[in-house]
Amino acid sequence: MQKAINIALGLAVVVLAAGLGYAIATRPAPGPDAAQIRSLVAQAMADTAVAQTAGTATAQFDGATLGPMIKDYLLANPGLLETMSIALETERRTEEAERSRIALDALHDDIYNDPFNVVLGNPDGDVTLVEMFDYNCGYCRQVVADVMALVDEDPNLRVILKEFPILSQASIDAARIGILVNREDADYQAFHTALYSGRGTVDTEAALAAAESVGLNRVLLELDMNAQDVTAALQRTYQIAQGLGVSGTPTFIIGNEVIPGAVPKAELTRRIASMRECGSTVCGPEEG
């Protein structure tokens, strides 16, 4: 009977740990992976079957009995839940990476070959960094200097900027003007930097002023900002975001990785170097 109790406790802990998932925030460390845990559970179930075949009685427990036993077991073995949480997190990251890879393959042409892409740096560069941004995003403002520094410092880097206005109608209006600036082959980098250098909300007026500063006619831009091709360009970026599960800005895409948030320049540089070394953002045993 004691053996059956131990098996029941072990299985209950596995179920509880799977339900908690992210209850413990921790960095991945060496330990059993999810496949090994499933193997242990399968072995426990096999042991139960053997015990039943041998005529050993198996006690039936209700929640009132099993619950306190599980609690006591976890309190006596706190490292078990942490170990299993690490394995579950590792498996989740692996599955997310695979989903991203599949989505990136399916959306490759829309991401890299859209005729409305803003391309900075070397258009024939050996590595491409994509940024999806919103002009009213504070975190985008934080990284703009780093992105421009990468363009200036790395002669073989291609940077694609994609207008992804998600914060307000003002952001959408500014993005429409930005698309026109790029379509008219004006100095988009100067326009882009000017908008992030200003104060307050970036709206139609701010975007028109920045466009005028790079030599475009604000009246013609305002008349054309709702053109069908401008709307279609925005819609394609929204579809990319939906396909990749992107819901915030900035979001970077490099190689086989989708990276949300304000990534430090050193991290972007490291990933670019890895792409050149092995064709992935991570080289060596951690790859994949």
Image: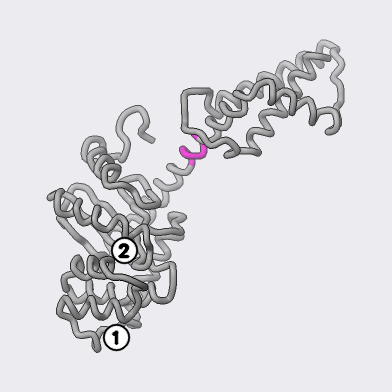
Horizontal and vertical percent for residue 72?
A: 74, 24
- Residue in the image at 20% along x and 80% along y: 212
Element carrying mark 2:
strand
Residue 97 rendering spot, x and y as whole percentages: 43, 42
Q: Quadrant of residue 209?
A: bottom left
Question: Which residue shows up at 24% across the image and 56% down it?
Answer: 145
Q: Is residue 174 left or right of residue 44?
A: left
Furthest residue toward front: 199
**Residue 70 position (above or below residue 3):** below
Q: Is residue 66 above or below residue 143?
A: above
Q: Which portion, as a residue range, is magenta? A: 90-95
Disc 1 residue crowd, few under 14, some 14–19, many 20+, Cα 10 Å:
some
Quadrant location of residue 73?
top right
Please identify the quarter of the rendering in which residue 37 is found.
top right
Q: Position of residue 55 (x, y in %)?
A: 85, 12
- What residue do we see at 18% from left, 81% from top? 216
Q: Is residue 238 magenta?
A: no
Disc 1 versus disc 2: distance between alpha carbons?
A: 20 Å
User: Which residue was labeled with disc 2?
Assistant: 162
Q: x, y percentage for residue 159? A: 23, 56
Quarter of the image with the N terminus is top right
From the viewer's perspective, is 244 left or right of 17?
left
Q: Amino acid at mark 2?
A: Lys
Above or below, comparing residue 55 to residue 217 in the picture = above
Assign the magenta stretch its main secondary structure: helix
Render colour scheme: one colour
Residue located beneath label 1 in the image: 222
Closest to the observer: 170 or 43?
A: 170
Determine the residue positioned at 30% across, 39% down.
Answer: 280
From the viewer's side, name the closer residue of 269 and 274.
269
- Along the polypeptide, which appears first: circle 1 or circle 2? 2
Position of the C terminus by quadrant? top left
